Amino acid sequence: MFSALRKSLVSGMKISEIQANVLAGLTVGVIALPLSMALAIASGVPPQHGLYTAIIAGIVIAIGGGSKVNISGPTAAFVVVLLPIVQKFGIGGLLVSGFMAGLILILMGIGKFGKLIEIVPYPVIIGFTAGIGVVIGTFQIKDFLGLDIESMDGDYLDKLLLIMNSLPTVDWQELLIGGLTITTLLLWPRIRSKIPGHLIALLLGSLTAWLLSQFSQDFSIATIGSRFHYELNGITGNGIPAILPSFEWPWNLPGADGTPIGLSFELIKLILPSAITIAILGALESLLCAVVADGMTGKKHNSNDELIGQGLGNIVAPLFGGIPATAAIARTAASIKAGSSSPLASVIHGLFILGAILALTPLLAYIPMASMAALLLVVAWNMSEPKHFVRTIKIAPRDDVIVLILCFLLTVLFDMTIAVAVGIGLASMLFIRKSITITSTTKVEKNHEDYGDLPDSVAIYDINGSLFFGSAQKALQAISTVTPNLRVVILDMTEVNMLDMSAIVAMESITESLSKQHIRLIISGLQQRMAAKLHRVGINNSREEVQFSKTVVDAINLANKML
């Protein structure tokens, strides 16, 4: 635990490095401020919960994790997972699921699951991230166009149909502000300014909306202040409360029916699948981000410590109103480019957002919902990486393309949990099929250049590849067919690199079959660790009909002595 912090403290930091990390923290804080609010809104909760997440999780994960430069907080990848939880269990259920996900992440770190990202096929990752981007982008159309839709219920196709049927209710005022914001977001990078484009876009959208409302009483659009309300000491306010996040057990918060959700074994059973999904997605996102950060900095993160740090952050954040968090690639990359080299940058980023809550909440209330939707549309587009998606389809092998498209469609039409499970399952099956095709057994010709003229009573079989449940029977079945005059069978297993229980059972069957026909078996070149597996089940030199040799030449000499 705390390996990133320990490494930073041991290596020491010069004044210039401290200054660079403070500047990087302020830079990424400016980026994270509106994004945290937008992602909380997209997840179905008030915007302050996104800010609380960036503060608490951003600081705790940076201190307790295994990456020096990861910036954690609410991310777009979580939106499609969190929104259904809020709709079904309310804010209380969401925070309880985040708390449980934190416990699971810690167990994953303790259990050395840090290599998790390596077992998830690349097409699966591309497929579900592109699918998430499409879902997020679709859900922002309502606020971007100002459509007259009371609630977005049902599955993806139901929501898409509802949006299409509501297109005649487009509000030109919302569209004007949303269009101005998204245009600024798209054009600002061409200026190559160090000021984050989304900050300028939101300022321009908010200022334009405010000015138009001053000049025309008919101009009225939804803002954070008009959409969200809070109650503090019996007084109702608009927008975001200018108070520090306070401690409260998440199960004391309201569920979908407005009453405290409580804590029970039944609730845990209902929420556990969601918590597992959050934990797996959080692990994948944080480790993927750490790998990207390593490539940018030339440093090496501790993957298991990073999982533990993510777990700590997701346990502490819900106690202060924070939603599930993980490392964000875009914010981490921006922090690195600004000079980040230690957890100090993430801590400063959290403190900056804390200061913004206390000082800027009256101004944040003026941000139009159409501008927030425009920001998320750009985030969704960047996340889906359409050019990379199309390129992968063009150049990837057919099996990988099938996995990619299937994961994409399942994420969009159903949910990410099904997509990842089916994607990994299908990729595994296709891998097994490929492994079966490359595992082979070939009978060596009589006049082999290395072994000379073999007698008819000796047969050599060259086995190549992995012998496991998918390939063992296919690879070894040829050996069961023998000629009447055969007396010795030599198995050249030099190129065998794996032997599972199915293969061991198949080897037992072959040994017994040859023994009944009074045919001796010599196993040649098998690695010691796999030979030991056969020895444990009785296929060893203690049996007269079975022998082991280091090379095929040794096996032939041994066979000649047996004849």
Image (cartoon, rainbow, N blue to C red):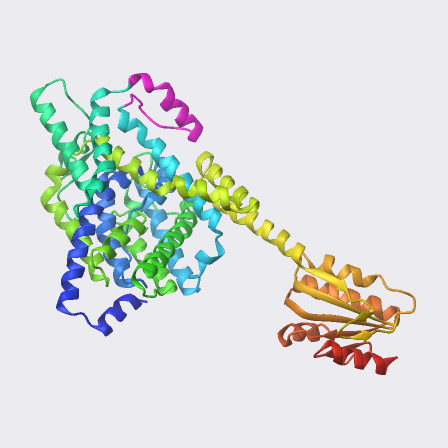
Q: Which quadrant would residue 84 be assigned to in this image?
A: top left
Q: Which quadrant would residue 471 be assigned to in this image?
A: bottom right
Residue 122 horizontal/vertical position (percent): 47, 50
**Span shown in magenta:** 147-169
Residue 519 horizontal/vertical position (percent): 86, 72
Residue 88 visible in image: no
Q: Which of 235 and 182 is in front in this view?
A: 182
Q: In this view, does 309 lie to the left or right of 194?
A: right
Q: In this view, does 445 lie to the left or right of 423?
A: right
Residue drawn at point x = 63 percent, y = 51 percent: 433
Q: Nearer the viewer, residue 237 or 198?
A: 198
Q: In which quadrant is the C terminus drawn?
A: bottom right
Q: Which quadrant would residue 179 be assigned to in this image?
A: top left
Residue 48 horizontal/vertical position (percent): 21, 42
Residue 197 visible in image: yes
Q: Which of 187 and 538 is in front in this view?
A: 187
Q: In which quadrant is the N terminus drawn?
A: bottom left
Residue drawn at point x = 66 percent, y = 75 percent: 532
Q: In this view, does 300 lie to the left or right of 38?
A: right
Residue furthest bottom as drawn: 561
